[in-house]
């Protein structure tokens, strides 16, 4: 992203420089106009003041512009993904798809994470991990048993079988796929 912008900028500057060079070489009357207006000849002319004053700062503006662009890119990378939010977003949401500030992260409900919230979320995370591991273990056990009792009778139905057999508690929340 940053490199593309740099290449385009350099390209435009080169094109502009080439254009000006051709103009000066091939169009003498216009070139004369340019010489006056850039302060090359007729030094006490009306444009001398511009080039020795404000005009001499133009390169500094370009440098400031480059720095501003860099800062903008950095901010874009680290700020909260919520539309119009300029806080630093270092809390991942939806498995890392979003970086959100504590105000916009759904788990924190607009408040700074408290000690209790951190404890609770950590516990929930551990429970989820354990449940997930338990589920995988159950499936693996079941698949290992499968060839013994049902000799390939229902191949595609096998992965959903553990949810059916492991309990009626999950029936209300839908099948595990
Ligand atoms: Zn935010």
Image: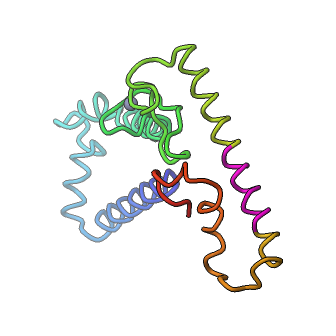
In this rendered view, identify the residue nearer to me: 154 or 62.
154
In this rendered view, identify the residue nearer to me: 84 or 65.
84
Report the span colored magenta.
131-142
x, y (%) of residue 8? 43, 59
**Outermost residue, top side:** 115
In this rendered view, identify the residue nearer to me: 71 or 165.
165
Query: Ligand 1 is located in which of the four quadrants?
Result: top left
Check residue 76 for magenta coloring: no
Say above or below: 18 vs 132: below
**Residue at image point 77% right, 63% down:** 140
Say above or below: 64 vs 142: above
**Outermost residue, left side:** 46
Main SS type for the magenta part? Answer: helix
In the image, 163: left or right of 34?
Answer: right
x, y (%) of residue 121? 57, 28
**Residue at image point 36% right, 38% down:** 82
Check residue 137 for magenta coloring: yes
Q: Quadrant of residue 100?
A: top left
x, y (%) of residue 34? 23, 53
x, y (%) of residue 165? 64, 61
**Residue at image point 61% right, 20% down:** 119
**Residue at image point 41% right, 40% down:** 81
Say above or below: 6 vs 123: below
């Amino acid at each position: 992203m940053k490199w593309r912008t740099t290449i385009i900028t350099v390209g435009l500057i080169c094109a502009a420089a080439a254009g000006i060079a051709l103009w000066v070489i091939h169009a003498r009357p216009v070139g004369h106009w340019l010489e006056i207006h850039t302060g090359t000849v007729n030094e006490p002319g009306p444009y001398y003041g511009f080039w020795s004053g404000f005009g001499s700062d133009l390169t500094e503006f370009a440098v400031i512009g480059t720095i501003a662009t860099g800062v903008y890119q950095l901010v874009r990378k680290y700020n909260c993904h919520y539309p119009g939010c300029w806080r630093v977003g270092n809390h991942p949401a939806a498995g890392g798809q979003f970086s959100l500030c504590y105000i916009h992260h759904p788990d924190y409900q607009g408040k700074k994470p408290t000690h209790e919230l951190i404890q609770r979320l950590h516990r929930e995370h551990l429970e989820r991990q354990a449940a997930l591991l338990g589920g995988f273990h159950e499936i693996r056990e079941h698949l290992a048993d499968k060839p013994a009792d049902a000799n390939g009778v229902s191949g595609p139905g096998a992965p959903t079988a553990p949810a059916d057999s492991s309990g009626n508690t999950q029936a209300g929340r839908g099948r595990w796929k």
